[in-house]
Image (tube, rainbow, N blue to C red):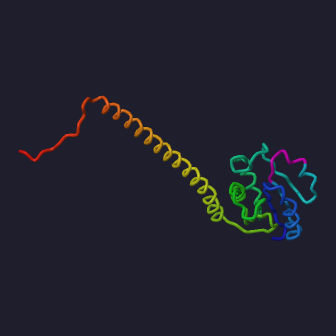
Amino acid sequence: MNKSKILIIRSAARVFNPCVSALKKEFPDSKIVILAPHSLKETLSKDPLIDEIIEIQGSGRMSLFSCGTKTIRKLQNQNFDLAVSLYNVEQGLGYSNIDLLAWATKSKALRSFNSKEQFQEFSGKNIFQKLLREKLSSFWIILNCILTLILFLAITVGIIAEWIVRKVFRRRIEKIPNLQPIKLSNQQ
């Protein structure tokens, strides 16, 4: 990768500068393109290691949806050699939306750069697995809360119903005069 064209998706501010420096050391003649929210354009444009900034509107969470199809097509047309996702954590859980964005650029290679300032290669398969881990854990937590609530309500309704039935039948039994137990005889 001599004159490499590299895209960095600026999603984690803490590791941004170390990532750019590491890439410039590994690929000194590379063109560094940054995908970042519009609100960061002025700050990023002052960095001498950055060659181009592609901005997305807003300052919220970056994802395929926040970028929109026009920006995704623009990124795909750039034919990047490498797309890099930044993580403020070691494993990158919670960053599958950034990984999907990197994958959507159709770059030749995909890497992440984490809080330990290490690169790690990844692929569409890795993104899918991470997405399942992230979303399924949330799904199971939500399902567990819903089922716990349903069980609590069922138990509460059952206890209240039993209390009502006991009250009603006790009053009815108390109203029957001279209620005596029935004696069964062996006579025919």
The C terminus appears in which quarter of the rendering?
Answer: top left
Location of residue 18 by image quarter: bottom right
Q: Is residue 155 left or right of residue 143?
A: left
Q: Position of residue 134 (x, y in %)?
A: 64, 57
Q: Position of residue 54 (x, y in %)?
A: 81, 51
**Stretch in magenta:** 35-42
Residue at the spot 94% in from the left edge and 58% down from the top edge: 48
Q: Is residue 128 magenta?
A: no
Location of residue 105 by image quarter: bottom right
Q: Position of residue 124 (x, y in %)?
A: 65, 63
Q: Position of residue 116 (x, y in %)?
A: 80, 67
Q: Is residue 28 left or right of residue 116?
A: right
> Relative to 30, does residue 76 appear above or below in the rendering?
above
What secondary structure do most residues of the magenta stretch adopt? Answer: helix
Let me know if residue 105 appears in the view: no
The N terminus appears in which quarter of the rendering?
Answer: bottom right
> Relative to 70, does residue 20 appear above or below in the rendering?
below
Q: Is residue 37 magenta?
A: yes
Along the line of sight, which residue is nearer the eye, 130 or 4? 130
Let me know if residue 166 appears in the view: yes
Residue at the spot 78% in from the left edge and 46% down from the top edge: 56
Q: Is residue 64 left or right of residue 179?
A: right
Q: Is residue 54 left or right of residue 129?
A: right
Along the line of sight, which residue is nearer the eye, 56 or 95? 95
Along the line of sight, which residue is nearer the eye, 73 or 183? 183
Residue at the spot 43% in from the left edge and 42% down from the top edge: 158
Which residue is situated farthest in the left direction here? 188
Instruction: Count numbered badges in the picture.
Output: 0
